[in-house]
Image (tube, rainbow, N blue to C red):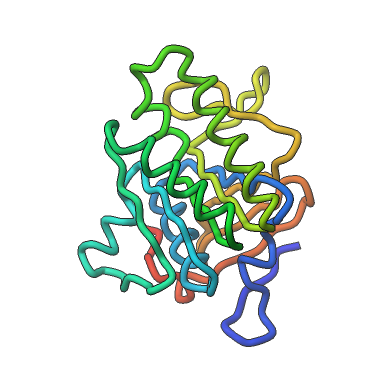
Amino acid sequence: MLSKNHESENSPKLKDILSQVQINSVLYSDPFVKAGFISKLVSEVKTAILYLDLDLLYSGYVVSGTIPSQDNLTLYRPSEDTLGEMVTEILVRASTSQVLVVIDSINGLFNMLHNKKDVGKVVASIVVLLASITRVTKSYIVISSMARYKKEEGWVLSPTGKRFIETKNSKKILLEQGKEGIIVNLLGDSGKLLLPANSIPISPVS
């Protein structure tokens, strides 16, 4: 059933659909739709947010002043040289208090680590370590992936076709552009939520 998320105290918040004991895997085909969803989530969260921006789309909006920065938001814009240091800092901070960790996106992480041997194992190790740490502090972890579904293989990263990092401990959230806003599909629950366009800080228009 599709429900509208009207801007009222009684309306559901995006944080309410996230799991504290699972990896929240946000799947999308349009990066602007993903940026709209993330901007809505970040605007609602009051706890500290540790945002590792690997495609630089969201942070580009913040740096340009299109959307305001928030006091509870720490943006990490890594290079190949600084990625390890930034991931370590996120792990340390997430191990000491409840936070929201956003890894945006897995595609960007693969691209940045493309020179590493067994890059798939390296990326999977980072994800598993972050998930373990955040579970201890009852933090939230959101990992975005540009992906498509292939009948023979399931979800694969787009456009590379690399295998999607599949874990039993994940909650899949598929984003789609609708006529009235962003449709949030909760794949495991077979539920849907509509985020009206006028409630989203970044207009999801490519």
Which x, y percent locates residue 152?
A: 67, 17
Q: Looking at the picture, does residue 149 appear above or below residue 143?
A: above
Q: Is residue 99 left or right of residue 76?
A: right
- Please name whichever residue, 74 or 167, is drawn nearer the observer in this view of the structure: 74
Q: Is residue 166 left or right of residue 39?
A: right
The part of the image, by quadrant, that contains residue 153 is: top right
Which x, y percent locates residue 116?
A: 39, 17
Which x, y percent locates residue 20?
A: 70, 56
The part of the image, by quadrant, that contains residue 130 is: top right
- The residue shown at (34%, 43%) is 55
- The residue shown at (60%, 44%) is 25
The part of the image, by quadrant, that contains residue 58 is: bottom left
Q: Looking at the picture, does residue 197 appear above or below residue 56?
A: below
Q: Looking at the picture, does residue 26 appear above or below residue 165?
A: below
- The residue shown at (38%, 73%) is 70
Q: Is residue 61 left or right of residue 97?
A: left
Quadrant, the N terminus: bottom right
- The residue shown at (61%, 24%) is 150
Outermost residue toward the top? 117
